[in-house]
Image (spheres, helix red, strand yellow):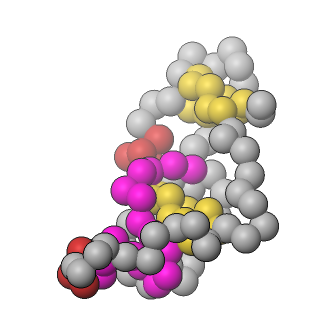
């Protein structure tokens, strides 16, 4: 398990997870959840990116989006909810991360 220290003073407002040392006064430890498999994609996008064409660079805060063969293809008989749930082939999780 890999952990990093980031400045915990409002990273969501600043849109960035700034790395800091363990003794920094506002340090927050974040733990990596691992890596995706080769057949799945996990990317971070600006929540306003409706096409999922431009993943954010490392340490930028955005929405986690996923795609792959085990990700749902849509809601049963509900095209509107399906359109709302996806952005350019990625499922929008609604979860912010860096």
Q: Quadrant of the N terminus?
A: top right
The boundaries of the magenta stretch are 82-98
Can residue 85 be seen here? yes
Residue 96: % across, % down: 44, 51
Q: Residue at x 71, y 32 (%)?
A: 4
Q: Residue at x 56, y 32 (%)?
A: 7
Compared across the picture, whether 77 is left or right of 44 comes to: left
Residue 36: % across, % down: 71, 57
The answer to whether residue 60 is above or below residue 12 is below
Front residue (pair 40, 48)? 40
Residue 57: % across, % down: 64, 64
- Residue 86, quarter of picture: bottom left
Can residue 16 be seen here? no
- Residue 56, quarter of picture: bottom right
- Residue 47, quarter of picture: bottom left
Front residue (pair 85, 78)? 78
Front residue (pair 41, 30)? 41
Residue 16: % across, % down: 53, 49
Compared across the picture, whether 13 is left or right of 37 comes to: left
The answer to whether residue 94 is above or below residue 13 is below
Q: Residue at x 30, y 81 (%)?
A: 83
Q: Is residue 50 magenta?
A: no
Q: How many marks?
A: 0
> Which residue ends up furthest to the front in the rendered image?
76
């Amino acid at each position: 398990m890999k952990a990093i220290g980031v400045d915990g003073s409002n990273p969501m407002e600043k849109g960035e997870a700034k790395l800091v040392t363990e003794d920094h006064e506002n340090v927050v430890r974040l733990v990596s959840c691992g890596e995706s498999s080769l057949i799945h994609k996990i990317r971070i996008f600006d929540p306003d990116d409706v096409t999922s064409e431009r993943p954010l660079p490392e340490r930028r805060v955005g929405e986690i989006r996923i795609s792959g063969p085990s990700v749902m293809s849509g809601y049963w008989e509900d095209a509107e909810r399906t359109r709302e749930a996806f952005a350019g082939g990625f499922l929008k999780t609604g979860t912010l991360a860096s």
